[in-house]
Amino acid sequence: MSRKALTFTVTLPLPGRFNPVAAVRRVTADLWTLVTTWQRRAEDRRRLQSLPAHLRRDLGLTAEQIDDEVRKPFWMA
């Protein structure tokens, strides 16, 4: 499994128009989105792992493919 760097980008307004309240709101919203994305990935992987064999076959996934996906850390897409 390859390792990828975790990146997080925050966009701030142009200098001279800086609004600290807006910046904090934006960072908070970005962090919330990131955390909920991580939670969704973790839950999706738990559900995938618990699928019965016939549903796994319906998805066209092998047990090895599912194991590879389930072993990924929550921050990796």
Image: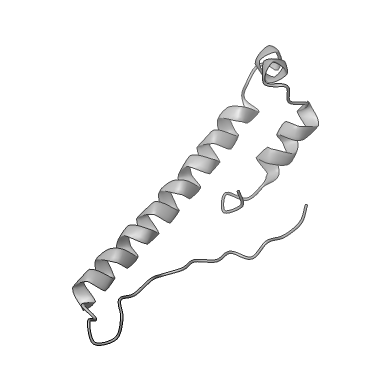
Residue name at image x 67 percent, y 47 percent = 72
Q: Could you say which quadrant of the image residue 5 lies in?
A: bottom right
Residue name at image x 32 percent, y 58 percent = 29
The percent coordinates of residue 32 (x first, y second) are: 36, 55
* 19 horizontally vs 54: left or right: left
Instruction: Report how many numbered discs are placed on residues in the image.
Output: 0
Give the color scheme: rainbow, by chain, secondary structure or one colour: one colour
* 71 horizontally vs 40: left or right: right
* 64 horizontally vs 53: left or right: right
The percent coordinates of residue 35 (x first, y second) are: 43, 53
**Above/below status of 71 relative to 19:** above
Q: Could you say which quadrant of the image residue 22 lies in?
A: bottom left
The percent coordinates of residue 58 (x first, y second) are: 68, 15
Residue name at image x 48 percent, y 41 percent = 40
**Above/below status of 33 relative to 50:** below
Residue name at image x 64 percent, y 29 percent = 49
The percent coordinates of residue 25 (x first, y second) are: 25, 65
Residue positioned most to the bottom: 16
